[in-house]
Amino acid sequence: MSNSLYNLYHEFIPDYVQDIMKTSLFQRLKDVGMNCGMEYTQFEPFKDCRGVSRYNHSIGVALIVYHFTHDKHQTIAALLHDIATPVFAHVIDFMYHDYIHQETTENLTEEMIQKSLELQSIFEYYHIDSDKVMNYHDYPIADNDTPQLSADRLEYTLSNAVYYKIMTKEEISNIYKHVQVNDSKDELIFDDFKIARLFTQVMLKCSLCYTSDENRYCMEYLARLMRLAINHHVCSYDDLYTTETQVIQKLISHSLTKELYENYTHFHKVLRSSFPQTGYLKVNAKKRYINPIVNHQRILDIDSKLNALVQEYLSDNFERYIKAI
């Protein structure tokens, strides 16, 4: 399913993108999931997302950037934007107590690109300035400030809509056809009001998944498990930059972490409480949302009902205690 999304974003993959995809640094992302470890639980819709990876997402973002810019450096910066993502992705942000910004996972990007001999060889062959591909935040079509629409946010919204069974590939293809670049070339926008509203509705459904009680509890549980594993030398910090398969093997091979991880894989239901109880956690999280432009206005300034739903989501303070079983 993953590969078939690529041709929705662009009709071909440029040669230099294909060459970077083959490097060992990029191949690692095949075993770093998009759902922060949730795919190893029994929760819907995540349990059906095994194999949905940062590899798929990164290629998708690169193709969207290429489609709208045809710029080599912007495309490569987009392709490499998740290259330093650790196993379980934003769980490691939680491990470092970075609940709101979730940016600690980006810290090693520049170092990993500079140290990769494979990448440097490809850059030399294609006359690519490595300094111009280190930081995709430099390119607003690739990434810009919330709540603007960028290639990164567009890709994970459209692909997750398919993986979470919110929409079909045909439906997201129709949405994509109505995306264009604004006049100042710093944001993706829509050319059709109904499509912009539909996209925003889909975005909200996905966002509610990202910050659900199920998601927040499991990410905190796994973060604590990884902290325990590192503190007791079950895993090392270097292991965070291997693959999820390798780290899981270490967790289940050690008596300290084996049962804790196996319990995690059986989680299927969340209990809630308004007061503290043994085993219950209160967990904050970053709220991701998009307020795209259509007809020279942001959709939430036009559609009051949709705005009310988004504001309800944004006003959730997560002031409740949760536990997964």
Image (tube, grey):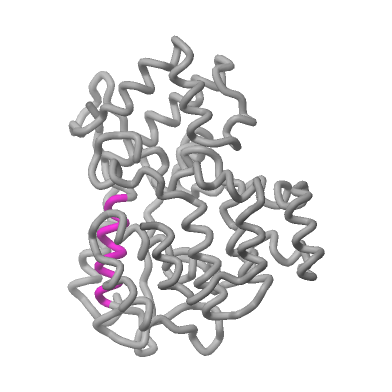
Residue 200: within the magenta?
A: yes
Horizontal arrangement in the rendering, residue 1 relative to residue 134 (left or right): left
Q: How many marks?
A: 0
| Quadrant of the image occupied by residue 258 | top left
Residue at image position (61%, 69%) is 75
Which secondary structure type mostly characterizes the magenta part of the structure? Answer: helix
Name above or below for residue 198 compared with residue 313.
below
Q: Position of residue 227 (x, y in %)?
A: 51, 25
Report the side of 24 relative to 154 (left or right).
right
Quadrant position of the N terminus in the picture: bottom left
Q: Residue at x 24, y 25 (%)?
A: 276
| Residue 214: image location, x then y, percent | 27, 39
Q: Which image quarter holds the C terminus? A: top left
**Residue at screen point 26% across, 30% down:** 267
Q: Which residues are magenta?
A: 197-209
Query: In the picture provided, is 268 more to the left or to the right than 148?
Result: left
Camera-side residue: 53 or 195?
53
Q: From the viewer's perspective, is residue 70 above or below residue 203? A: below
